[in-house]
Image (tube, rainbow, N blue to C red):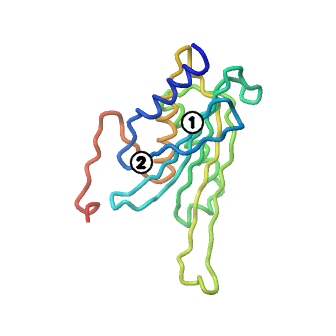
């Protein structure tokens, strides 16, 4: 399969993926200089009241000739960010936990990969002066990339499911199993 047709299969799969009802995804411009082929999406994780509780981006890169830095022909580049409880951001293990959210999501969705790398940043902020009335905030940000093992007929779906799981976990939203429809409680509807 040529590089163009295999990447077309990837983009078709991204566009047809069944996203969680609380994960809104849209295509965004992809970087043009990193690889001959790239496709990017941006996501917002919403509560039932449509409040944004997390955001993310996923870029799928493809170089039919391969890339030594990736150790492969494809690369997934991910970003996930969400607010967390102030107590969580002081936990010295939060960064390690954030990284395991990614690796466990990949493993749970049978998304074979190698050469994963990234950073997990946890920060808190307190406002002063004219902004002193604003609440203290804490957030976690997971930036990662990995080389997906997609097989002869490239199948990106397990990696999309893993990225969605990462977004949902980071935002505190439990992911839905395939075929499950989320029911809302009366409290969520208010």
C-alpha separation, residue under disc 2 versus residue under disc 1 = 18 Å
* Crowdedness near tag 2: few (<14), some (14–19) or many (≥20) residues, C-alpha within 10 Å: many
Q: Is residue 166 above or below residue 10?
A: below
Q: Residue at x 54, y 45 (%)?
A: 28
Would residue 14 be found to the left or right of residue 123 on screen?
left
In this view, the residue farthest toward the bottom is 129
Which residue in the structure is indicated by mark 2?
23
Mark 2 or mark 1: whose residue is earlier in sequence:
2
Which residue in the structure is indicated by mark 1?
39
Residue 130: x and y, percent?
60, 86
For mark 2, give the secondary structure.
strand
How many numbered discs, if any?
Answer: 2
Q: Is residue 126 above or below residue 38?
A: below
Q: Quadrant of the C terminus?
A: bottom left
Question: Which residue is more in the foreground, 82 or 153?
Answer: 153
* Crowdedness near tag 1: few (<14), some (14–19) or many (≥20) residues, C-alpha within 10 Å: many
């Amino acid at each position: 399969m040529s590089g163009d047709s295999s990447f077309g299969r990837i983009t078709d799969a991204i566009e047809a993926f069944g996203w969680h009802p609380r994960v809104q995804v849209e295509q965004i411009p992809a970087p043009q200089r990193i690889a001959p082929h790239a496709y990017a999406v941006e996501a917002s994780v919403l509560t039932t009241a449509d409040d944004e509780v997390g955001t993310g981006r996923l870029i799928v890169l493809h170089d039919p000739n391969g890339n030594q830095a990736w150790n492969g022909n494809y690369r997934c580049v991910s970003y996930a960010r969400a607010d967390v409880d102030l107590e969580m951001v002081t936990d010295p293990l939060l960064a390690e936990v954030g990284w395991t959210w990614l690796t466990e999501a990949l493993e749970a969705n049978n998304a074979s990969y190698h050469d994963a790398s990234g950073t997990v940043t946890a920060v808190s902020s307190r406002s002063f002066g004219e902004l002193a009335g604003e609440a203290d905030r804490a957030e976690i940000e997971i930036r990662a990339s990995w080389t997906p093992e997609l097989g002869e007929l490239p199948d990106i779906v397990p990696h999309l499911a893993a990225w969605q799981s990462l977004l949902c976990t980071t935002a505190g939203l439990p992911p839905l199993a395939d075929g499950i429809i989320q029911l809302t409680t009366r409290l969520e509807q208010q």
